[in-house]
Image (spheres, rainbow, N blue to C red):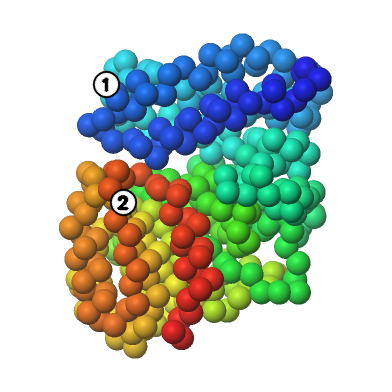
Amino acid sequence: MTSDPAQTILPLLTCIETLGLVARHFDPSAFGEVMASIGTPEAALQAIRPQFDDNSGPDSVGGLLARASDEALAGFAELREAAGQGDVRLVFKALRHLPRAQEALYPLASLVPVVNAFFLDPSLRSDADALKRAMQLPRENETGVFHVENEPRTRAGFSLYVPENYTPDRAWPLVVALHGGSGHGRGFLWSWLRDARSFGAILVAPTSAGNSLGSTWALMGDDNDTPNLARIVEGVRGRWNIDPERLLLTGMSDGGTFCYVSALDRRSPFTHLAPVSATFHPMLVSTADPERIKGLPIFLTHGALDWMFPVEVARQAQRALSGAGANVTYREIGDLSHTYPREINAPILDWLKGSSSSG
């Protein structure tokens, strides 16, 4: 590599951020416009990619940058293929390279200042104290990123992030974030990690157990996921100092729907719910324990352009849940289709820290 790693790494960071923009703004009817707007940021990364081949091993700085670059470049290549073929199904496959690139890059956050800043909220990147707090080496078996029986193509495991500045002398909020249908917790972790790292939360991203419907959550039939979530939460609470008043269950699409299915049960350990781009049926309220719903803090997010679950579904959920006594906060995002709006994470964390299930 060159003597200035920051300048060398910038094309990689730009590519990862651009893949994130495609993921955020993807809409089948406007995919061509999105692709036209991003230009060709991968060209600069392709030009500097040979500098990362330093033969120092896969976990060296060069090895990690090489792996992250290869994932990012594969994502762009597959996006170009999807655009050329007009097959939007290929877009979802291409975007799976985004969290893989982030996972490969993240170990450098404690070593390289520009990577440390990249994994912080933009509002904190000029804050010297925040940068210093974040740039700490993970402590073995205590902080950083962990994957517990959660390798790709496995089910029912979970990925975990504990901020590197974690100390047990105070209680920390817990965010349990559920992936969408056909997703995986190991990938969905990266939809939330930057915000958990920036604003102080322990993050769990489980993977659904899977059932006869495929790899999604137990939305009907036998429910193997709810007891698995309870087991995971119990284990995390036994190991780290978790605030008992700040246990959030959130999720995207089928994961958001499963927030309702699982956490409206009176036995649920979760104190707050935040479904995103979820579907909803009034029966979920009518069959739930009224005392569980009364006063329950729920942060509901949906896109006005959602092509899978039309926004009226979320408006109906707001009316039904509020009518049953839940404390509902509703956010409708005008330019959001059926994708994950990472910008909603910080407001959700503010809400989580500022409200309690007891009112």
Name the side, left or right, on which 81 lies relative to 187.
left
Circle number at residue 314: none
Q: Which amino acid does label 1 sit on?
A: Gly
Q: Earlier in the sequence, mark 1 or mark 2?
A: 1
Image quadrant assignment for residue 116: top right
Q: What residue type is labelled 2?
A: Ile
Q: Name the residue under label 1.
A: 86
**Residue 265 appearing in the image:** no
Viewer-side residue, 228 vs 125: 125
Viewer-side residue, 30 vs 236: 30
Is residue 123 positioned above or below 268 on the image?
A: above
State the quadrant of the N terminus.
Answer: top right
- Residue 309 percent coordinates (x, y): 23, 51
Q: Is mark 1 on a helix, strand or loop?
A: loop
Which residue ends up furthest to the bottom in the rendered image? 291
Q: Which residue is drawn at the image coordinates 72% and 27% (left, top)?
A: 6
